[in-house]
Image (spheres, rainbow, N blue to C red):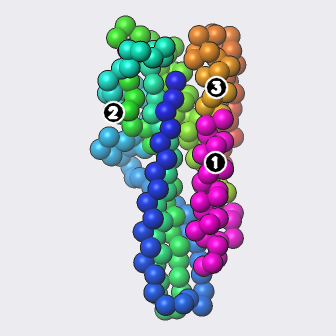
Amino acid sequence: MKRFLISFLFILFCGSVYAQFYTRVEWAGGTDPYKGDSIYYDPGYKLSWKDFKGQPDMNSVAAAITSSGFGYTMAMNSRNNKATLVIKVSCFFTTRGSWVKKGMRSDYALLHEQHHFDITYIVTCRFFQKLKNTAFTRDNYSELLDRINRAYYEELETLQNEYDGQTRNGQLKDVQLAWNKKIDGMLAALVIN
């Protein structure tokens, strides 16, 4: 199962009218995937059951829940009549929002949950590439960024729902196997620059 988190942080440092406007899109995070309650996506790090620290919802039909999402911060820097919009994108898993019921820890279930985080990363990479390829201006960046963010949030929600719906939350093993291959293929095809 999944739960989505989208975070927005707008930090604007605006000065006078700028003659030149630039945009820089970067990945947020660092070399350590852990940051407080969050684990930032790192292709070399796979989730383990110790990362699921939330209190299980015993009324839920789910055996486990992965709480993951993407977000961005935005800052405007100015110097010498030039403005640079810096957008930092992150993909994260929240440990306190993610849980597993007692007796439900298996490698099979963990892979299903890992793939929820992988799907979040796939969509975050698409969001990142879209931002890099968008012609932001001083007049349109706020509206465009909001519109693009909403579109990729909807894409994430759709893909996560398809994954759980078609696999019946991982219960249909043959369908889960097909999704495992599909997700692995999507990860292998990602181009990040």
Tell me where residue 109 appears, x and y as whole percent: 49, 16
Q: What element carries label 1?
A: helix
Q: In the image, is 107 to the left or to the right of 130?
A: left
Q: In the image, is 167 to the left or to the right of 61?
A: right
Q: Mark 3 points at which residue?
A: 163
Q: Are marks 3 and 2 in contact (CB under 8 Å)?
A: no
Q: In this view, does 77 lie above or below 17?
A: above
What is the magenta range? 131-158
Q: In the image, is 165 to the left or to the right of 103?
A: right
Instruction: Identify the residue shown where x is 58% and y is 68%.
Output: 142
Q: Which of marks 1 and 2 is nearer the N terminus?
A: 2
- Circle 1 crowding by C-alpha within 10 Å: few under 14, some 14–19, many from 20: some
Residue 120 magenta-drawn?
no
Toward the top, the furthest residue is: 103
Tell me where residue 149 appears, x and y as whole percent: 60, 54
Q: What is the chief secondary structure element of the magenta stretch?
A: helix
Q: Name the residue under label 2.
A: 96
As rendered, which of 3 and 188 lies closer to the eye? Answer: 3
Amino acid at dot 1: Tyr
Q: Mark 1 points at which residue?
A: 152
Q: Is residue 42 above or below residue 99?
A: below
Residue 141 falls in image quadrant:
bottom right
As rendered, which of 93 and 41 lies closer to the eye? Answer: 93
Instruction: Identify the residue shown where x is 42% and y is 68%.
Output: 11
Amino acid at dot 2: Arg
| Disc 3/disc 2 C-alpha distance (Å) | 23 Å
- Circle 2 crowding by C-alpha within 10 Å: few under 14, some 14–19, many from 20: some
